[in-house]
Amino acid sequence: MRAKTRRYRQIALVVVAAAVLLGVNVPPAVNYVQEWRHERLINSAPYKAQYGHWDTVEVPPDNRVNSIHAALLNDGKVLLIAGSGNKEDMFATKALKSMVYDPATGSSKMIPVPDDMFCGGQTVLPDGRILFAGGTQRYEKLDGAVTNAAGAMRIKNENPAAPRFLPAGTEFTSPTGQKYRSDFDATVAPAVKTGTGARTKVTASEEKVFVEAEQSGPAAVNGNRDKYSISGLDAADAKNLYGLGEPMTLDKQDYQGTDKAYTFDPKTEQWSQVPNMNQPRWYPTLTPLSDGNVLTVAGLDGVGQVLNGQTEEYDPRANTWVDRPNLNQYFPTYPSLFETETPHQMVYTGSNAGYGPSDKGRVPGFWNIDSNLFTPIPGLRDPELMETSGSAFVGPVQDQRIAVVGGGGVGESPISTARIDFLDLKDPAPHFTPGPNLAQPTRYPNMVNMPDDTTLITNGSLDYRGKGATNNHLAYTLDPTTNQLTPMADPNIGRDYHTEALLLPDGRVLVAGSDPLFDDEKNTIPGTFEQRLEIFTPPYLEKGLPRPTITSAPATMDRGQTVDIPTPDAAHIAKARLIRTSTATHVTTTDMRDVALPMQKTPDGVSVTVPPEPTIAPPGPYMLFLVDDKGVPSEAKIVNVP
């Protein structure tokens, strides 16, 4: 009897233990089955043929960078620029990085950068070099971290005979005896002298520099705009050189920009310094113009203040920066600016990356950079939600249609929008019109022109920098002929702030970066920068259909020129496209465009004609695609429009 009871008890214990074990492991088991089924689904041929496919790329640990900026080079490789990568310790140790990735082979190569290019601006020059201007001179200091009162000092020079160099550490003394030292070198131009005799007038020149109190604590706080003396000057210089101080406070200090500029040569894979800009800039926009120059606007200056509309151009032929004092137009940082088909008529969509007041420079409009006339454009939905929105030409640039996608409120606002609005620049009275909405409100959407004339829209987050684990893992294609969104396969990796996307010559899309503020839903774990890359293969490459091929293409295609492109697939070629090699940062891509080429069939292939208008095809490198009657593109040949 005891043996039977013992056996029943053992059986009962086994049953209970099994039940407990099953209860603990059923949810993971169910999740495993669900994930297994999901993986089978997204890797199945029918699914990929309809939605495309994402592949995660793990670069070697020694070659990983915090990708802040991305550029497609004219050899098909991708340049990813980190600088200090939003890491103050990297800034302090000058561990400044960039990396070249070859999507054709999967190889990567680290290339040190000579200055902190974190959050500068970039574009592709007509000869294929990458122009990079601005970046970080000094990291921000948040509220509570500022120990020494500091602020902007306007150094005045009333001597018209000569400029004056004042090194970092120059001492400025207030009327009350408080002393402050400059953080960086400053060169003050000579004063401007006009007239003669009794009508002689001298206008003092001015240069701003950031200064900090020698004494810590509140005693050095000074809310007055006092005149400061400069130590170490003789009596004559002291009459002509002095400082006008802005308020010296213990408040939060913003990032400060640099005036340094560089080019990257894809042939040598080396950085070279070019002349400095006229203004330091952090978060600037560089927009290529039809004449080959680069329009440069906006940014935080060398003391952390939003530039008050100062504009300049880089002339790559003369290798100089040309100040444009007649073009004073205030924009928030990283404004989305494009040249329209009318020469020197720019369009500002209202998209931007943030710094600046909510009531200044936020209205979209046309900006004539000959007359400085700015004409607002009406009709935009959710106009107060344009920070971190995306803007791009959609479809062939000859159609002159722009889409504005997503965005959020000013600063760290939790509010965002799913809005897509269109702007038809050919309309006699241009205005925004509603398009389809995204599946959810989205900040930081990447936009990429595709060779089939659609635009890929991918990634982003509901909240500021993905707070609350709100990255959306979504992708769509936008068809400008139907104004419809089509869902694509979900990206494996969520991406928000500091992310970029570029079309590759093989017709795929590379996505990099992401800098979440937190890594958890409760916003308690500091965020980790995403260093993995991801490549999207669109459905047109997953249908198992043969791709058309380009037998050869000339290295140069002149504007207005008709060029024969040999291909064995001429009977099935439906269209030819030039898509400019582009750059991206902070959801700002100003040099991307899809150019339709008029096409005729020939005995050996097709002949294509490059549009004659430089505003349609600005000078620079382009990817030449042939697209067949099933929407499948060839691999591109990279050509140059000089």
Image (cartoon, rainbow, N blue to C red):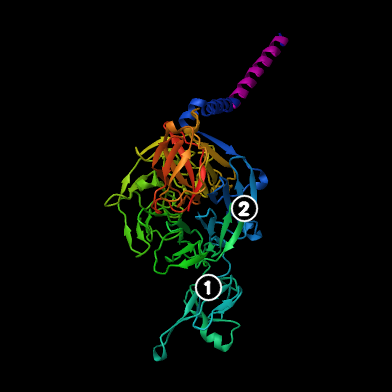
The residue most toward the top is: 1
Q: Is residue 67 above or below residue 155?
A: above
Earlier residue among tags 2 and 1: 1
For the residue marked with disc 1, what is the amino acid? Val
For the residue marked with disc 2, what is the amino acid? Glu
Residue designated by label 1: 221
Of the pair 382 and 6, the residue shown nearer to us: 382
Q: Position of residue 475 (x, y in %)?
A: 46, 38
Residue occupying the point 56% across, 25% down: 33
The magenta-colored residue range is 3-24
Of the pair 94 and 428, the residue shown nearer to us: 428
Query: Does 254 appear in magenta?
Result: no
Q: Position of residue 28 (x, y in %)?
A: 58, 28
Q: How many marks?
A: 2
The quadrant in which the N terminus is found is: top right
How many neighbours does mark 2 have within 10 angstroms: few (below 14), some (14-19), or many (20 or more)? Answer: some
The residue most toward the bottom is: 198
Residue designated by label 2: 269
Q: Mark 2: which secondary structure?
A: loop
Q: Is residue 16 above or below residue 88?
A: above
**Most frequent secondary structure within the magenta stretch:** helix
